[in-house]
Amino acid sequence: MIDVCSSSLHSQRRDGTMVKNGTVGDIYAHLSRDDIPAMVQRLDPQIEWTLTAGLPNGGTYRGRDAVLKLFAGYAEIWEGLQVVPEEFFSSGNVVIVLGHYDGVSRQSGKRAVARFAHVWRLRDGLAERFETIADTRTILEALS
C-alpha cells in the first residue's frame, strides 16, 4: 500500500486554480487510497514514467500497463510506503511536487525517509510524462 499525506494539497497554481482539484491532485488522492487502477486512468495511455536511475526498477516505463506492473512491485520491496507531497508548483502544463517517501525495506528492515521532486507534464487533462528525482543514497542505504 502506498499512502499519501499532505497538509498542503490545497496549494494554488499561479492562475489561482487549486492543484488539488486537478490531474496531479487526483493522482495523489488515488495513491492515498491505494487505488492504483484509478490513478492510472489519470495518465495518458502512452505515459512516459521515469524513475531515478540507480534505484531498483530505475529507468523509463511506457504505457499504463507498465506503470501498473511497477506499482505491483513496490509492495514486494517496501512495507508501509508513503508518498508525502509537501509543496506544489505549477507553470503552464508542468506541475512540480516536492515531498518525501517514507517506508521500510522488507529485505533489511531499515526505514528510509527520502526527499523527492516529482515533475508532471500534462496534456488534455492527463499526465503524459512523469519523472521522479529522489535521494538515492538514503533509499539504497535502507535497501542494503
Image (cartoon, rainbow, N blue to C red):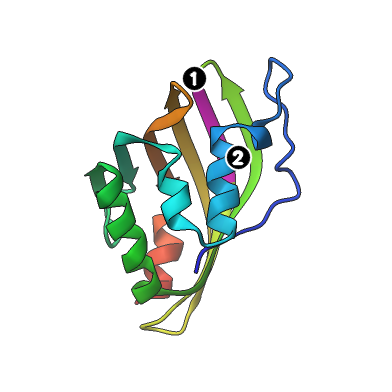
Say if 56 sits above or below 90 in the image. Answer: below
Residue 85 placement, left or right of 105: right
* Nearer-the-camera pick, 72 or 85: 72
What are the residue bounds of the magenta stretch?
Answer: 93-98
Residue drawn at the location 72% of the way across and 27% of the way down: 12
Under circle 1, the secondary element is loop
* Nearer-the-camera pick, 95 or 143: 95
Q: Quadrant of residue 87?
A: top right
Give percent across and percent down for residue 122: 45, 25
Residue drawn at the location 60% of the way across and 50% of the way down: 29
Could you say which disc has been placed on residue 25 in the image?
2
Give percent across and percent down for residue 108: 39, 84
Residue 120 placement, left or right of 87: left
Say if 25 sits above or below 108 in the image. Answer: above
- Residue that numbered label 1 is attached to: 93
Give percent across and percent down for residue 137: 41, 60
